[in-house]
Amino acid sequence: MSSPQASCLPLRWHLVRLAVGTLLPAVVFAAVVVFQLARLERKAVERRAVQSARALAGAFEREMSGSIRSLRVLAESDRLDSGELEAFRTECERVLHTQPAWKHVLLFSPDGQPLVSTASPMGAPLPPLAEPASFARVVQTHQPVVGDIAVGRGPSRVLAFPVRVPVLRGGELRYVLTAVITPEALTDVVATASGTEEWTRALVDPQGLVAARTRDPERFVGKPATPAFLEQTRAALEGVFPSVSMEGEPTYVAFSRSQPSEWIAVVASPRQLLDAPVRDSMLAVGGLGLVLLLASAGGAWVLSRRIERSISRASDAAAALALGKPLLMEPSSVRELAQLGEALERSGQLLRERERERDAHLAAAETARAEAVEATRAKDLFLATLGHELRNPLAPIVTSMELLRRRGLAGTPEHEVISRQLRHVVRLVDDLLDMARITRGQMSLHREPLELSSVVAHAVEAAAPLIGQRGHVLEVEVPPSGLPVLADADRLTQVVANLLTNAAKYTPPGGHIQLRARERDGGIALAVEDDGQGLPPDLVPRLFEPFVQGPRTLDRSVGGLGLGLALVRSLVEAHGGRVEARSEGPGRGSTFTVWLPAHVQAEAPPSLEARREEPVPSEAEAEAEARPAQALRVLVVDDNVDAAETLAELLDMSGYEVAVAHDGVQALSRVESFRPEVVLLDIGLPGGMDGYEVATRLRERLGESSPVLAALTGFSQDGDHTRSAAAGFHRHFVKPIEFDELLAFVGSLRPRRSGTA
């Protein structure tokens, strides 16, 4: 038994964690309470700041109200009734001395013409109206108005704002009396009642221009406030918000909009004045909590040392027990540790017994594993040999049937029976070998963009003989385009053909089979439905396992090995899909549904002929093509005499000059005399020289003049294809060969002679 893993902590650390875990919630709670109290304190400071801004706004309104009252008294002068403007100007000058905030007094006619100005003597030209917006409001409302900051039109161009009062007689506006006030007059207003938390106090007119400011007034008075300030104060009467001052420093701004003048009173405080209480409180609580945590952790560390020593001795005793050494457990005053020592002694006895049993089981398991590995190797070899040995006798049978067809002797019912049963045997061999490849994880897919309709067409063509033989009606509902998949065309065709064949087998003659496909759940669903014998409920969960079949009659009329549906599931899952079976019970038919992921860039699949097309011919092929047109010479090398002779006869009937050899030595000799352009070479030749050796010697002897080689073999594993390609074979044909496919390959190399059979 090894020592504790590095991720495990000693006891003292667990005790420290216990102490910290107990104290930490209290520290966190205290921090939360302090944070809330500090936040409430900051809210109180914010309220005081708003109150200060409100007081500043009130002070401004009181100042303006005093000016308005003085103007109203002046507006009642009899001099205005009698039109004695010069005498009225004298009164204005007298009143001006009593109003230190006023710069000038102006009198305008209702149409805005200047009549009197204390800044200019009587008879002198008067400057035009400045800040007309407030003048228009007075004319419209007949109410006093405090205007905005503006630059005067006189020679001095003074920055000021007007306070305007209407002069009414009998409800009719006769004049507009204006007091011009400079921003300096507001200095005392903004400088009043400054608190410790305040930093800057200011007054801003309705247009957003700074009218007065306690900090750097000569720099900022008359300048527009920041856009952020204008945005925050546009819709509210008062409030507090974080901002950046005109100097670029972070602040909290409290504001209040005065009524009725709509000027904004501002109190700006540095953010640190409001944030400092929260920060300082949290630092204090954090520091105190850290001290308490360290103190409690230190105490737990010291107290744990004694207990840890006793447990360490027990751990050493357990380690010695695991190594088969004598126990060195010392007596302990802790009752639990004493009980642990007794348990370790009993465990030592049991451990020795279990070790003896383990050794026996390990020996048996190793023997079983070796036997399983050998059995797997033997099974793989058996399957490869089985495929080869089954395909070899099938090859001459298939070729002979093709010869009979070409001679016009294939129209009899007996010929059709033999052909049908022969195809069945070939399919059984293919299914058996495919299932073996899938079980070993050696199945490879050659995916390409496909339209599902082309796959369905090939599958229907493959299953049509059985469907027709049993008299079924097949309905296909698959759109010609719009159902793209990324798949191996041959394997997906095999899936659909297996489902159709399964439906045809288990449906009584004269039944109905439906094949439908549509988009579903972001993919493509293909369903094969029949009205056959259906599925028992207990069979459905096991239906896609190898060698599982539905109820069979004694005559086994439907045939098969029970591998078709197992292949379907394996191939569909290899394509990233799923398959399921559904039936309402025996005698009520069944439905098999395959779901495949859609492929957004799929193209229509090429035909089987196009997919089987060979690559661009080699230099040897190009040289053969350049020779004068004559009968292409083909050498057939096969140790199966029947297979070689029947294939040679078929090639001869197709217009080719053919020679035959039955072993490697004879093949090399015939190459020297016959000079073939194509060699159909069996891989498994007898006599110590297989097809690979023959191919190697041909290349050594002939070099670039070597004929085109095509493997003709019963070995169909993926590794066999790879090995033949590496050995220089241009094509790998698996017995029994599709003769049309062979003719297409040979015909692509050279034109045939005329007058073929």
Image (cartoon, helix red, strand yellow):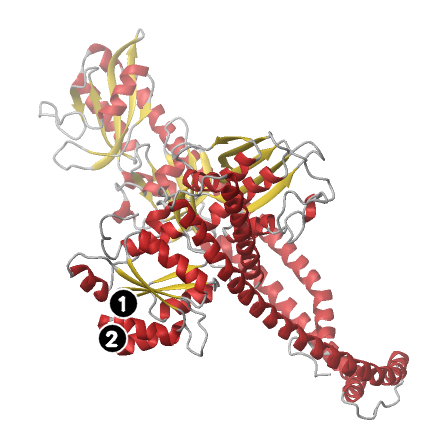
Among the two numbered marks 2 and 1 on one chain, the one whose residue lies closer to the N terminus: 2
Q: Is residue 399 above or below residue 620?
A: above
Element type at marker 1? loop
Q: CA distance from mark 2 to mark 1?
A: 8 Å
Residue lying at 64% horizontally and 54% vertically, measured from the top left: 546
Packing grade of label 1 (10 A; few <14, some 14-19, many >=20) is many
Q: Nearer the viewer, residue 628 or 70?
A: 628
| Relative image position of residue 234 (x, y in whole percent) | 38, 33
| Relative image position of residue 645 (x, y in whole percent) | 40, 60
Q: Nearer the viewer, residue 177 or 560?
A: 560
Q: Is residue 615 above or below residue 104?
A: below
Callout 2 touching callout 1 (CB < 8 Å): yes
Element type at marker 2? helix
Where, by quadrant of the figure, is residue 68 drawn? top left
- Residue 702: numbered disc: 2
User: In this figure, which residue is indicated by the disc labeled 1?
Assistant: 707
* Camera sees residue 522: no
**Three-letter code for the amino acid on which mark 1 is drawn:** Pro
Residue lying at 63% horizontally and 69% vertically, measured from the top left: 290
Q: Is residue 266 above or below residue 2?
A: above
| Relative image position of residue 598 (x, y in whole percent) | 45, 43
Residue lying at 69% horizontally and 61% vertically, measured from the top left: 25
Most distant residue in the top direction:
170
| Relative image position of residue 429 (x, y in whole percent) | 55, 56
Which quarter of the rendering shows the N terminus? bottom right
**Three-letter code for the amino acid on which mark 2 is drawn:** Leu
Q: Is residue 389 left or right of residue 535?
A: left
Q: Is residue 50 above or below residue 659?
A: above
Where, by quadrant of the figure, is residue 534 drawn? top right
